[in-house]
Each structure stands twice: as structure tokens, then as C-alpha cells.
Amino acid sequence: MLDSEVLEGAQWSPLITTSGDMALFEAGYEEATKESVIRFLTVDRNNPNSILSCVWSARENARSIREIISSEMWEQANRFYHLVREAAESDVILRNPHAFYTSVKMESHLFDGVAGATLTRSEPWHFLRLGKMLERADKTSRILDVKYFFLLPSPDWVGSAIDGVQWAALLRSASSFEMYRKRHRRITPEKVANFLILDRFFPRAIAFCLFRARESLRAITGTPENQYGNVAEQRLGQLTARLNYSDIEEIMKEGLHEFIDSLQLQLNRTDDAIRDTFFAIPKASAGGFASQKTLGQ
């Protein structure tokens, strides 16, 4: 393999790692190139996390609850889907990826804004925010972990000009560069990690997302503060308590990758608990009645 091909793979494969779908990618593609990675992450219908798959699922979900959401939300979800579908049927994505992905970001922001402006702060809105905050926390953690663990091939590069450029790129990929610079003059790994993990005021920081998710979960269940009524509340409460009593020195001493890896496992367990608590269909018992299970049994 030519050196240029190795370099290209090193540039594009971290994007697959960030998505958490490397096994699925390797099952369908021979190597990580610009074309294969863009196709997999953007228009591959066999990838449930591709942009096309996600906007299709969002549109179908919106269709099934049209009587609950606003007409403006449905119209935006429908418009978003058709924008991506039409782009997938042309060469516009490979020809001008920056313009396409910028439009995807703006359409996503527009849907979020429409939902915030037209949906009452009742149970549907809180479920929407709960899912959004958990997903955002997960993606921020993955972006941070990929930079720290995968992008620097040698420890000798730490603190180098390349390292600084990559940390700045990480902040931009999390839409946090300007807000970080308003808080800090210099870009350092510890300050970036602190900002993206523990900041309580930046809306893409993990702590911000998880505390907002906990607020919405409590609004849905009506459980009083400092109590939990189901496993989902218990696990999310444990996660926020961990962040509440962590500091960046402790995290860096433990190892940023190890901390994030553990955090992602807790996030996955929380996601599973939310699904089981609110969306799983109870299994019927032998007598034909749904079995019941209470916390602690």
C-alpha cells in the first residue's frame, strides 16, 4: 500500500471510530477512503446511523405522531429528508461536501429551533430534549476520545504544533471554538477537556447535557429531587453525581480515555434503562398477563 493511501486511511478512519460503527463499516468496505467514509456516514441505508437513515427515521417517527407535534415540525422534518435524499441521488456531496454538511447542520438547527418555538413544555417536549441531550453528550465524548486516543500516533507529538491544530479542530467540530476562546486564552488539552466535559453553561458540554437530561426525565416521571422511581432515573442520577463530584485533575490522572470509556458505558446503560422503562413492550407471562417488576425485586 502506498504511503499516501496509509495517510488517507489515518485521516478518515477516526470519523468511523467517532460514530462507533467501525465493525459495520469494515463489513461493507475494504478501506477508509474519502469516498467510502462519506458514503457510509452520509447515504448508506445499511448504516442505521448514516445521515440519510437518521433523517428518514426522524421523518417516519414524526409522521406517526403528527397529531402531537406542530405542523411546522412536520414540515421541517419532511423538508430535511428531501434535501438529503435529493443530494444522495446526485454527486453534490462528493463535489462540495462542505456546503452539503453545512446545510445539514443548519437544517438540524432549524428543526431544533422550530420544536423549541412551537411545542409546549409538556411530556413530548421533555422526551425530545431527553433524547437530544443524551445523544449530544455521547457524541461530544466520542469526539474528545478520538482526538485524545487515536489521532496522535506518537507521544512525541503531544504539545507540538500538530497537537495544537488538532485540539483547535476538535473544538470546531464540537461547535465550541469561539465559546472556548471567550473563556480561555490558550488551547491546552486539560482546559479543552474541562470545557467539554464539566462545563455547566456550554450547551454541548457533557455535564450540561446530562443535567438537562435529568431535568427532563424528572419532569416526565414527576419524581421529587434526590429520589428515583425507576432504573432510568437511578442510572442517570449516578452519572450526573459522578460528574458533579469530578474535577479535571482527577480525570486526567485517571486517564482521559479511561474516564470517557467508562462514561460511555454508563451512558449506554442509561439509554437501555430509558428504553426498558418507557418504550419496551412487557413480555406476557404464561397466564397471558404482562409480568410486573418493581425496583429492588
Image: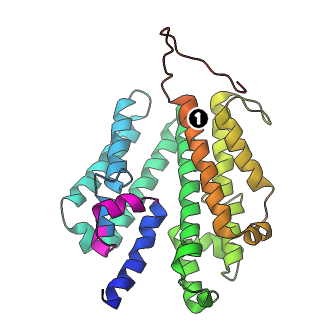
Q: Is residue 88 magenta?
A: no
Which residue is most to the left? 90
Residue 98 in picture, x, y percent from top left: 35, 72
Residue at 68% x, 34% y is 218
Q: Amino acid at mark 1?
A: Arg
Q: Is residue 32 magenta?
A: yes
| Vertical relation: 236 (above or below) 163 | above
Q: Please name the residue that numbered disc 1 is placed on.
A: 121
Q: Nearer the viewer, residue 235 or 54?
A: 235
Is residue 262 in view from this perspective? yes
Residue at 61% x, 43% y is 270
Q: Quadrant of residue 276?
A: top right
Q: Residues within 10 Å of mark 1 (few under 14, many from 20)?
A: few
Q: Quadrant of residue 144?
A: bottom right
Residue 83 in picture, x, y percent from top left: 27, 54
Q: Nearer the viewer, residue 272 or 56?
A: 272
Residue at 79% x, 64% y is 247
Q: Which residues are magenta?
A: 20-36
Q: Quadrant of residue 163?
A: bottom right
| Vertical relation: 289 (above or below) 142 | above
Q: Nearer the viewer, residue 79 or 188?
A: 188
Q: Nearer the viewer, residue 167 or 272?
A: 272
User: Which quadrant of the rendered structure holds the N terminus?
Assistant: bottom left
Is residue 196 in view from this perspective? no
Residue 160 in picture, x, y percent from top left: 61, 91
